[in-house]
Amino acid sequence: MNNRYLPMTETDKQAMLETIGVDSIEELFSDIPESIRFKGQLNVPESLREQELLKYFNGLANKNVSIKEKVSFLGAGVYEHYIPSIVDHVISRSEFYTAYTPYQPEISQGELQAIFEFQTMICELTGMDIANSSMYDGPTALAEAAMMSAGHTKNKTILVSKAVHPEARAVIQTNAKGQRLNVIEIDLKDGVTDLDQIREHYNDDTACVVVQYPNFFGHLEPLAEIEKIAHEKKAMMVVSSNPLSLGLLKPPGHFGADIVVGDAQPFGIATQFGGPHCGYFAVTKKLMRKLPGRLVGQTKDEHGQRGFVLTLQAREQHIRREKATSNICSNQALNALAASVAMTAIGKKGVKEMAYQNVQKAGYAKAKLKENGVTIVHDQPVFNEFIIQLNAPVAEVNQKLLERGIIGGYDLSQYYPELENCMLVTVTEIRTKEEINQFAKEVGALQ
């Protein structure tokens, strides 16, 4: 046996060839003309023994800058938060770790209940009626929400704030192109969405108004005012929200949002160099049958015992493919489970306390940066992110911070040229007073 993870013997190979009626592997390719077959050696390195291969990949991994060794003030959509140790213990159990689609409820009650609990907790956080079993990530969920709005209203124009994460806006643009939808990006005013510009572009063809809360810069959008504009005609209000912030902030559902989406990464899911994570998707009851992805419901068996099943299964992955408004036929079951375990372990009071610490520590960091001569841009209430103005390029400052053991914030000029030398700083409950003081001191000295 030459390959450890490909346990097929020569006897196995010959038996398969005999079954299909050929004498050799080469005969399988006999229909391909000799003139176009590759004759030489592939330009790939020679194979390595297992120990050599492990050493090679460990060397590559060690080149990464990790939050395990550095103090991080980088967020912008992926955050370092407290993860209870029980999370890894539960999701590492084989019955969860290897589970995929629970199509047979009689043997999948544990997985189905875990998904049901995830849906329930997302509904409680967002103030919405129904949530699905998860989606790939936050940006995917937001694009699906925009597409669903267009399908439901039969309108073709999507209004999306430029204060929505730029990568999420890019996913919306890509999806809209395939659906032949028109995407209009709304400018900003003092770090939040320009309401006058929404009114200017809003018309009978508007499918939805898309905003983020807190927005990409950490600021709080005026959802009550946006709701009035969005629902003036038959358009929908779509809100992308950090779920941890909803432990403290009034949830979008209480402002009249039709769809609330986001990434569950702040709950129990490590940063993991950007993924994989877990999107959530919550709607009002009237949109229940338009909801993409899977939905787990609670029922009773013939003995009256509580049970769980996949419900409303006339969905895109089953019998309604020609009517589907989504191509999402899967979910992030394992990461959704991690989020469920984390939320359960932390509890309602704990989630509120975590959110409160994010607000307080971000406020403390702003004050210390000001003391060190750093300018705060759009100095207004935030959750855990805010913008600072530097006197030097952010890339240069971040490189010098890295040499001092600190991972700096996000360079906003990458997507917002008007915010040259501006850094998006993130401060979560993980950061200590000493770390914040050191960061403020170093930034003040380097700018």
Image (spheres, helix red, strand yellow):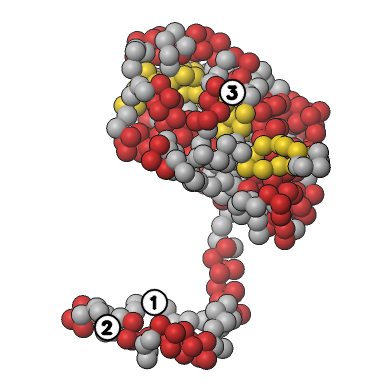
Report x, y in % for residue 62.
Answer: 59, 63
Of tags 3 and 1, the one toward the viewer is 3
For the point 46% across and 13% down, which residue is it?
A: 230
For the point 42% across and 38% down, which residue is it?
A: 324
Residue receiving disc 2: 30
Numbered tag placed on residue 44 in the rendering: 1
For the point 42% across and 31% down, which residue is it?
A: 147
Label located before the other in sequence (3 or 2) = 2
Is residue 297 left or right of 137 when viewed as pictured?
Answer: right
Q: Which of the pair 103/54 is nearer the observer?
A: 103
Amino acid identity at mark 3:
Lys
Depicted 155 relative to depicted 304: above or below: above
Residue receiving disc 3: 285
Task: Check disc 1 and report its element: helix, strand or loop.
Answer: loop
Q: Is residue 245 visible?
A: no
Q: Quadrant of the N terminus?
A: bottom right
Mark 3 vs mark 1, CA separation in Å = 55 Å
Amino acid identity at mark 2:
Ser
Task: Check disc 2 and report its element: helix, strand or loop.
Answer: loop
Report x, y in % for residue 258.
Answer: 53, 21
**Picture quarter containing residue 420?**
top left
Report x, y in % for residue 50.
Answer: 59, 80
For the point 71% across and 55% down, which residue is it?
A: 107
